[in-house]
Amino acid sequence: PQLMPDWASLSRFEIRHVTLPLQRYRALDVPSQVLGHSVSGEAMLPLFASLYWCLDQHKCFCGIWLVPLSEMANGVVKWLTRRGRPAWVDERVMMHQWSSEFSFPSSHSQLAAAVMTWLVLSSAHAEAATSTPALPSAAYALLVAASRVHVGLHFPSDVAVGLLWGALSAAAYAHIVLPSLPSFVHWSATSRLCALLLPAAAAGLAVHAAYCVAERSRGSDPPEWSRNACRGRYKGRELDPRGVPHGNYMGMLGVLAGLAVGGAFKHLFPLHYPGSGASAFVRAVVGNGGLLALFEGIGAATPRQPLRLYAALRFLKYWLVPVYILLLAPYAFVRLGL
């Protein structure tokens, strides 16, 4: 099954009236690519890590769940709708960045809107230690969305739905989901671990079911998609919008599993906020240096093939991220007196 099987007319209209005119502004090439990278894992890691260690532990721990859940939910919809990206369906569209995923909806737009909405709304929470202004946050999410159109990876309708979905899901999470959850304060660590593993189990089942649906359509993609995508600097690459994203989503499943472990045992590693800006800077530099070394080290050792090994190492790499942020780094900071 496919939720929206006929994208052709809308895609042609959007490419002609929005994508191609926007791509004429070559001065936007580099800023658009930078904005896209700002929503990558390498950029999100220091953001959430610094939040927890130096600024606002509530915003970090509660908000970081939105990242893997948003990514995996987005992937499920992508596999069910299977819309080709602009640069896949029209050779006139330049593709400034590579992606193996389908197009609808935009995960970058969804994630930017979800994180920014969460940071703004959670500022009113009693445990929040910082306040995030709404206007710059909204502007950033909109710029990320526009950049995805400019680099040839998304249609305007992709980013519009992504922005709306991200903002609404974060608002529902902040105002409905979190207030309705039971307090885990008096639960045992084992009980907390079991409860916190439930989102990982549900997300894993949803991704597996959608992947099975997408696999049944393997071979039905128009041949010009691969031909248009794998040209220029991307010549020689293989376009696989099913297997490669599946490996990527295993990384997000690893984040959920790591959050369950970190959330269950973080009370054993309490961390006070630094007493000065200089102390916060040193803590952020030391902590993020170790985190990025761990993250990039495993990434460098991760082969693209076979896909099962790729998926397993992605799971391990991303599982370690919340464990490091919530448990290992706080322990090291206390021992080092940071």
Image: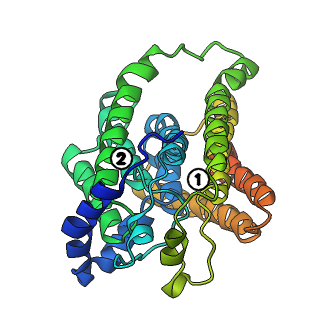
* Position above or below: 232 against 95: below
**What residue lies at 23% left-to-right and 69% top-to-bottom?**
16
User: Mark 2 or 1 closer to N-term?
Assistant: 2
Q: How many marks?
A: 2
Q: Residue 197 appears in which quarter of the rendering?
A: top right
Instruction: Report the Cα–Cα distance between label 2 and label 1.
Output: 40 Å
* Residue 43 in the image, given as x and y percentages of width and height: 48, 61
Q: Assess disc 1: are there few (<14), some (14-19) or many (≥20) residues with their C-alpha within 10 Å of its C-alpha.
A: some
**What residue lies at 49% left-to-right and 33% top-to-bottom?**
62
Instruction: Check disc 1 and report its element: helix, strand or loop.
Output: loop
Which mark, by number, is residue 162? 2
Q: Assess disc 2: are there few (<14), some (14-19) or many (≥20) residues with their C-alpha within 10 Å of its C-alpha.
A: many
Residue 117 in view here: yes
140 or 192: which is nearer to us? Answer: 140
* Position above or below: 258 against 288: above
* Residue 273 in the image, given as x and y percentages of width and height: 49, 43
Q: Residue 72 appears in which quarter of the rendering?
A: top right
Residue that numbered label 1 is attached to: 338
* Circle nearer the viewer, 2 or 1: 2
Instruction: Check disc 2 and report its element: helix, strand or loop.
Output: helix
